[in-house]
Amino acid sequence: MAFDYKKEYKEFYLPKAKPAIIAIPAMHFLAVRGCGDPNQEGGAYKAAVGALYAIAFTIKMSKMGAHRISGYFDYVMPPLEGFWRQEGTDGFDPARKRDLCWISVIRLPEFVTRDVFDWAVREASAKKREDFSAVEYLRIAEGLTVQCMHIGPYDDEPRTLAAMHAFAAEQGYVEDFSPERLHHEIYLSDPRRCNPAKLKTIIRLPIRKA
């Protein structure tokens, strides 16, 4: 049976719809950086997501080809995630989409080393005849966060964020945004196929003791 990160690490991928404090360990990701409205047709965000999945599926489906990756195990593709920031503010305002800068990521299985990543980029580039040099092999040590499941449209996130801010303050924490510690979202639903009222998005905010 394929290893499913969402099922094996429920504390990270299936939180309750109420805020909780959680420490997130370091993980490796495929990553693409960019700025702009993520909803723009033909925009940088959609291109970034396409590049991520091209490399991610090259690694996952390597079992079907001649190339053998040491330590490979079959797994369910982890969900798409995003780290978000906006110029001129430490917080996050989903209404200001044109001002968004992002790091779009997909978690990598533990067997994916830098050498495996480099092979996958070469392989995907040759097969698809595209330039995937924007894709990075990125280690992120997220650390202490307040986490919550948001259910509903992305534009309704402010209500969940308000509850997260209030909970963190009640527990004696303050937000701890920096260029390395950003607003984080994990997308458990496909917005192309899901009723917006039922979209499930994990939200994490970096915090520290007040």
Image: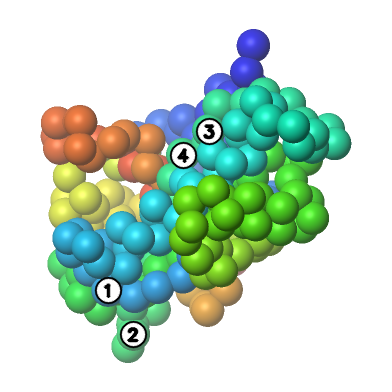
Q: Where does the image place residue 193, in percent across and percent down from the top left?
A: 20, 31
Q: Earlier in the sequence, mark 3 or mark 1?
A: 1
Query: Image point 20% across, 75% down: which residue?
Result: 98
In the picture of the structure, the residue carrying the numbered disc 1 is: 36
What amino acid is labelled 4 in the image? Pro
Query: Image point 64% across, 62% down: which residue?
Result: 138
Label 4 packing within 10 angstroms: few (<14), some (14-19), many (20+)? some
Query: Image point 40% across, 73% down: which residue?
Result: 34
* CB contact under 8 Å: marks 2 and 3: no
Give me the C-alpha separation between circle 4 and circle 2: 26 Å
| Helix, strand or loop under label 1 | loop
* CB contact under 8 Å: marks 3 and 4: yes
Mark in front: 2 vs 1: 1
Report whether 70 appears left or right of 104.
Answer: right
In the picture of the structure, the residue carrying the numbered disc 2 is: 87
**Which residue is outermost to the right?**
70
140, 133: nearer the viewer: 133
Label 2 packing within 10 angstroms: few (<14), some (14-19), many (20+)? few
Report whether 11 appears left or right of 74.
Answer: left
In the picture of the structure, the residue carrying the numbered disc 3 is: 77
